[in-house]
Amino acid sequence: MDPVTHFTSGVVLLKTLGFKANTRSVVLFGSLALLPDIDNAISFFGTKADYLLYHRGFTHSVWGGLLLGILAAFILKNIFKNRFLFFAITGVAIMYTHIYLDYITSYGTQLLAPFSRHRFAMSSVFIIDPFYTLTLITLLIFALILKNRKTAIIVAAFLIFYPAANLGVKSFVRFKVSKLTDNKVIVTTTVLTPLYWKVIIEDKDRYKVRDVKIYQKINPATFKSYKKFDKESTVYNFNNKFLKTYLWFVDYPVIVKAGGKYDFEIFDLKFIFNYNIFGKQNHKAFVLQFKTNNRGELT
């Protein structure tokens, strides 16, 4: 989730837990809510493979959140006067809220790192969701103006339950598409979710994908088809740390002819915007481009 939403979540907890909302406390709680993203430092000191592997890793895990929450408790204890246990609960709540806000995206988070590198993802809220963030900020402003803790609790409830409500919409879209095909249907977020959803139809060798509106008639014949990339393929001899990490990172990888400087490119369908919402057809992120020789070996 984006930094603005994370910061706002910290201020929501500030009001919900009964702290006085002055400039110092707002900045403090908002900043603490960003603390798990300290793992972004890996982008300055590590490789690209390290970033894919360790961002949203330990500091976004159950145990990392607990340790960061205790660290936050010591900071809060030195500023406010109350029992340490109360601040420990507060600190852990702030960290786990951050982890939850990343878990609800399609990027996901490694909840059990470092014991497991599995990436857990609810995929019910896009990485930047203006409906979610702007509504959250608006409700929070009302809570700050009214100086009413009950209003703050309502804001906190929205923070938690909006992603859950989106799951209902997501299930509805999957149900609509499942009636149109016998193949596996995957639904995940895209730009302007929950009004739009990315639908992926999977068969043995190919994926078909399209971003659809929840209120439009869905026609699988209009979906764009891509050749699956087999993660277990030995054709390209992907035998180095970065390539292995990249293939661990992607969920729905496809391979296409790249042309120009490179021969092929691989990308994950969950990171492609194939509906012409902003006039950018097929915008992709996390794309791997590579060349091969005349024997098909990776060069």
Image (cartoon, rainbow, N blue to C red):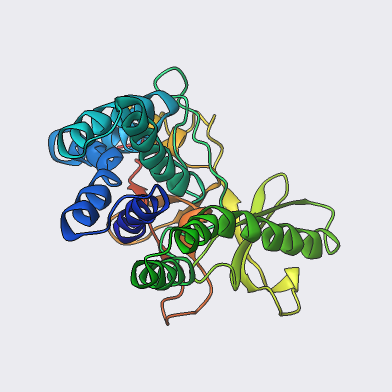
* Percent x, y of residue 149: 44, 58
Instruction: In this rendered view, identify the residue nearer to me: 200 or 95.
Output: 95
- 62 over 252 or under it: above or below: above
Residue 173 horizontal side relative to residue 13, left or right: right
- 296 over 63 or under it: above or below: below
Q: How many marks?
A: 0
Q: Quadrant of the N terminus?
A: bottom left
* Percent x, y of residue 69: 32, 31
Residue at horizontal 45%, vertical 49%? Answer: 101
- 118 over 260 or under it: above or below: above
Instruction: In this rendered view, identify the residue nearer to me: 179 or 86.
Output: 86
Q: Which of the 4 quarters of the picture holds residue 60?
A: top left
Residue 191 horizontal side relative to residue 293, left or right: right
Residue at horizontal 57%, vertical 60%? Answer: 162
* Percent x, y of residue 86: 36, 32
- 148 over 14 or under it: above or below: below
Instruction: In this rendered view, identify the residue nearer to me: 79 or 212.
Output: 79
Q: Taking the image as drawn, is residue 124 in sight?
A: no
* Percent x, y of residue 208: 65, 60
Residue 247 horizontal side relative to residue 210, left or right: left
Residue at horizontal 48%, vertical 32%? Answer: 235
